[in-house]
Image: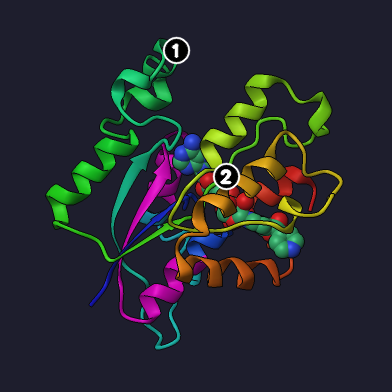
Amino acid sequence: SKRAFIAGVADDNGYGWAIAKSLAAAGAEILVGTWVPALNIFETSLRRGKFDESRVLPDGSLMEITKVYPLDAVFDNPDDVPEDIKSNKRYAGSSNWTVKEVAESVKQDFGSIDILVHSLANGPEVSKPLLETSRNGYLAALSASRGSSLSLTYIASERIIPGYGGGMSSAKAALESDTRPHSFARYIIHRIKSTGPLRSRAAKAIGF
Ligand code: ZID
C-alpha cells in the first residue's frame, strides 16, 4: 500500500484532513505534519476521541494516523530558527520540526513515502490589501505557503478577489508556477479551483 505524508493538518475541518481521509479510504497509510503551535491541541483532541466521528471511513472503520510530526514549514533547518521562536514555550516542547529534520525523521521511521501533500498556508496580513501589506507580511505569506508537491491553490492567483490580500494571491501564483512542472499536480490544481470554499480555520480568518 501507499504511504502518504500530508502537511497542514491541525484539526478535522480543513482540506488536509479531508485528503487524508480519502487517501486512507483508498488504503494508504497516513502520516501528517502539524504546525508546532497547534500540535498539542491536535494530539490531545485526537487522543480524547474528539475527531472520532469525522474519522469514520466509508467502510465504517476509523482513519488511523500512523504518526503525527510537528512541523514548521517556514524553517528548513535549526540554523534558520530565530531565538524568540526557539525559546517560545509552544515550540520548546517539541523537537526536529524544521523541514529537513522532519524529512529525515520520516526517512528514519519509514524509509520512504509515496505521496506528499502540501495543504498549508499562512498569510499573517491576509486581510490587508496587497498595497498595504508590509514586506515582512508578504514574505511570510510566500514562505509558509510555497511548495512544489501536490498543493492546494486558489483562483485569486489569477483574478482579483477582494479580501485575499497580504501577499496570499502572489503566494498562490508562485505555488502554481512551482507546481506546474508536475503533471499530476496540475490536475489537482484544477479540481481544487472548481470547488467552493471550505470553512476551514484558514478560510474563516479571511471571512469566507
Ligand atoms: P487549514 O487551516 O485546515 O489548513 C492550513 C494549515 O496550515 C493549518 O493546519 C495550519 O496549522 C497550517 N500551517 C500554517 N502555517 C504553517 C507552518 N508555518 N508550518 C506548518 N503548518 C502551517 O485550512 P485549509 O484547509 O483552508 O487550507 C489548506 C490549503 O487549502 C491551503 O493551501 C489553502 O490556501 C488552500 N485553499 C483553501 C481554500 C478554502 O476554501 N478553505 C480555498 C483555496 C485554497 C478557498 O478559499 N472557492 C472559493 C474559495 C476557495 C476555494 C474555492
Does residue 152 appear left or right of residue 133 in this picture? left
Query: Position of 11 compared to 69: left or right?
Result: right
Q: Give amino acid for label 1.
A: Asp
Reading the image, the residue beneath label 1 is 84
Q: Tell me which amino acid carries mark 2.
A: Ala
Does the image show residue 52? no
Span highlighted in magenta in the image: 18-45
Alpha-carbon span between mark 2 and mark 1: 21 Å
Look at the numbered disc 2 and say if its residue's Cβ is closer than 8 Å to ligand 1. yes
Q: Is residue 58 magenta?
A: no
Could you say which is closer to the camera, residue 143 or residue 106?
A: 143
Please give the label number shown on residue 113: none
Identify the secondary structure beneath mark 1. Answer: helix
Q: Which residue of the protein is positioned furthest toward the top in this rendering?
A: 83
**Predominant secondary structure in magenta?**
helix
Measured along the vertical axis of the image, is residue 142 above or below residue 53? above
Residue drawn at x 26%, y 33% as measured from the top left: 96
